[in-house]
């Protein structure tokens, strides 16, 4: 625990662990019971997953069954579906 004084304002640097229930506990003799204090939490850095383009994501997908064997078949059936909307 380190105490720094800058002018009239003091700062404490305390490292603690998150307890069950996502709670933290700070015990410092320098604190006065009932006194208001400001608390800043610095979360540990988490490694960012590497950024990938949409094309890389699509290319990484395993080959799967297609709903229609060809694009032309898809277009034909899609147009048939559209035509049924107008009936």
Image (cartoon, rainbow, N blue to C red):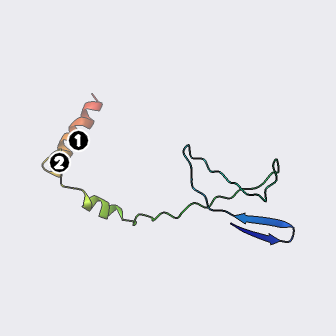
CA distance for labels 1 and 2: 14 Å
- The mark nearer the N terminus, 1 or 2, is 2
Q: Which picture quadrant has residue 79?
A: top left
Percent across and percent down for residue 36 are 81, 51
Q: For the point 68% across and 59% down, which residue is it?
A: 40
Percent across and percent down for residue 15 are 62, 62
Find disc 1 in the rendering and name its residue. Answer: 78
Q: For the point 60% across and 47% down, which residue is it?
A: 23
In-image side of 67 versus 86 (left or right): left
In-image side of 7 versus 65 (left or right): right
Q: For the point 54% across and 45% down, which residue is it?
A: 20
Q: Is residue 75 above or below residue 2?
A: above
Q: Nearer the viewer, residue 21 or 72?
A: 21
| Quarter of the picture holding the C terminus | top left
Q: Nearer the viewer, residue 31 or 72?
A: 31
Q: Which residue is farthest right?
A: 8
Percent across and percent down for residue 64 are 18, 50
In-image side of 47 versus 62 (left or right): right
Which secondary structure, mark 2? loop
Q: Which residue is farthest front?
A: 29
Numbered tag placed on residue 28 in the rendering = none
Numbered tag placed on residue 66 in the rendering = 2
Which secondary structure, mark 1? helix
Of discs 1 and 2, which sits in the foreground? Answer: 2
| Quarter of the picture holding the N terminus | bottom right
Q: Which residue is farthest top?
A: 87
Q: For the point 82% across and 72% down, which residue is it?
A: 6
In-image side of 48 versus 76 (left or right): right
């Amino acid at each position: 625990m380190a105490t720094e004084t800058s002018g009239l304002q003091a700062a404490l640097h305390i490292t603690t662990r998150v307890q069950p229930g996502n709670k933290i506990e700070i015990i410092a003799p320098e604190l006065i019971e009932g006194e208001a204090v400001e608390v800043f939490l610095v979360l540990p850095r988490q490694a960012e997953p590497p950024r990938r383009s949409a094309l890389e994501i699509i290319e990484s997908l395993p080959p799967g069954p297609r709903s229609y064997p060809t694009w032309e078949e898809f277009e034909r059936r899609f147009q048939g579906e559209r035509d049924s909307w107008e009936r």
